[in-house]
Image (spheres, grey):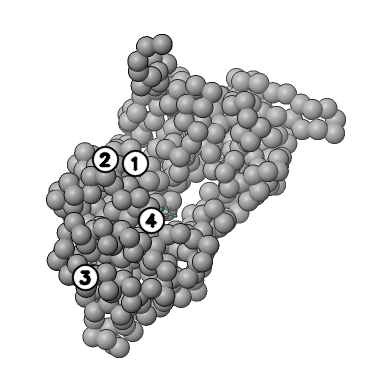
Amino acid sequence: MSQIESLNFLEAGTAAEVAEQWGTPVFVYNETTLAGQAEKALAFDAPYGLTVRYAMKANPNRFIINALARRGIAIDASSGFEASRAIQAGVNPQDILLTGQELPKNLESLVEQGILFNACSLRQLHEYGEKFPGTNVSVRINPGLGSGHSNRTNVGGPSSSFGIWHEYTDQVLAVAKEHSLTINRMHTHIGSGSDPEVWTRVAEMSLEQTKHFPDVEVLNLGGGFKIARMQDEIETNLGTIGPVVASALEKFYQQTGRQLKLEIEPGTFLVANAGSLVTTIHDIVDTGEEGYTFLKIDSGMTEVMRPSLYGAQHPIVVVNNSPEEHKKYVVVGHCCESGDLLTPYPSDPEVVAERLLQKADVGDLLVVEGVGAYCAYMSAQNYNSFPLRPEVMRTCAGELIEICRRETLPEMLQLETGSD
Ligand SMILES: *Cc1c(COP(=O)(O)O)cnc(C)c1O
């Protein structure tokens, strides 16, 4: 990493103001960024209609859901609990598609409320069919191809358990027939990627599948649109992916006379760069001349686990008044856990890497950027008994509003019931 990263949407003053008012660590989200990304997603090329579903597992806070829902974005829920959470946030159940690894225990009640169900295995299809014979259902197919940025984010191909293997069409049709189900949606989600070639192949493979399912009216290609967190990364240009998918849909229409509606399910794309984490440097240590200098922050895997999990790279910005002085640091979190590392080697969480940053002092703020997706709600929450962090939204009008307050120790302990 040679380039110094700079603040994304926060200014140094706002970061200090947020830290002053809410303490650190604190997440700040920018509604203007959410609105801009929503607009780009809604402009995706789709000749016969488009639904954009927000993959809410990226960040299920209801203020985020509603900031997107207000702009015409529907929901992809990954569990029954997420579906209920979206309904409680005010989302119309008909706008929620449930695509989960595990069937919810309250599937009946959710479906009766109106949510749409996407069967991700033959067993799920069968169980759904037993409960709701004669209804419409969606199926998730593993098209045999994946494109995630690491093994842990790859959700297609033979090493992935997600969806029904593409060679089992006959079984899918048989289960559907047994329960008089109408398969009206074909779903494939194969993980993060920005290569138009890959999208063309997935679209074509999915459409090939769709030929076996005469009642399918909707093609859902999932999410996985890559965004640029670091300066040297490039955001997926939806303007180049859209047309290749659109032309595959048009070709399908010419061949079959069927006009399919398109659905996409971005998570990362909508929210990742809409979030910043403001932390404080509370200690600086080094391991001698041959070693490293470590910045210790009052956050870490309790808020941001992607670096420890995948070796993911997030921009890191030291906020102080010495922009001219630079120094290489390793940034570590506050957990007693050697894996609690903010600067791993790219794609290798096992290896420590140095990052060139503004020269730092104890007490300086340190902002981790690109943390709107898969951070605040995908972390080692409460590990070392650190309380859940607050979240703040900067609205389009520039106002800072609290959308989640900091947890207290009694709140953390209140689920420990009984007496000893
Ligand atoms: C997680 C998920 C998404 C979103 O993935 P991103 O990489 O965040 O865009 C979309 N669809 C399904 C079914 C998912 O599980």
The residue pinned by badge 1 equals 60
Q: Tell me the SS state at disc 3.
A: helix
The residue pinned by badge 2 equals 85
Q: Residue at x 47, y 30 (%)?
A: 381
The tally of labels here is 4
Q: Amino acid at mark 3?
A: Glu
Q: Is residue 113 left or right of residue 343?
A: left
The residue pinned by badge 4 equals 266
The mark that comes first in sequence, 1 or 4, is 1
Contact between marks 2 and 1 (CB within 8 A): the answer is: yes
The mark that comes first in sequence, 3 or 2, is 2
Q: How many residues crowd around disc 3 within 10 Å: few (fewer than 14), some, or many (20 or more)?
A: some
> Alpha-carbon distance for marks 1 and 4?
13 Å
Q: In the image, is the residue at mark 4 within 8 Å of ligand 1 by its beta carbon? A: yes
The residue pinned by badge 3 equals 178
Q: Is residue 44 visible?
A: no
Q: Amino acid at mark 1?
A: Pro
Relative to 325, say whether 121 is above or below. Answer: below
Quarter of image, ligand 1: bottom left
Task: Residue 81: give x, y in percent of width and height.
Answer: 29, 42
Q: Is residue 319 left or right of residue 141?
A: right
Which of the image's four quarters has the C terminus?
top left
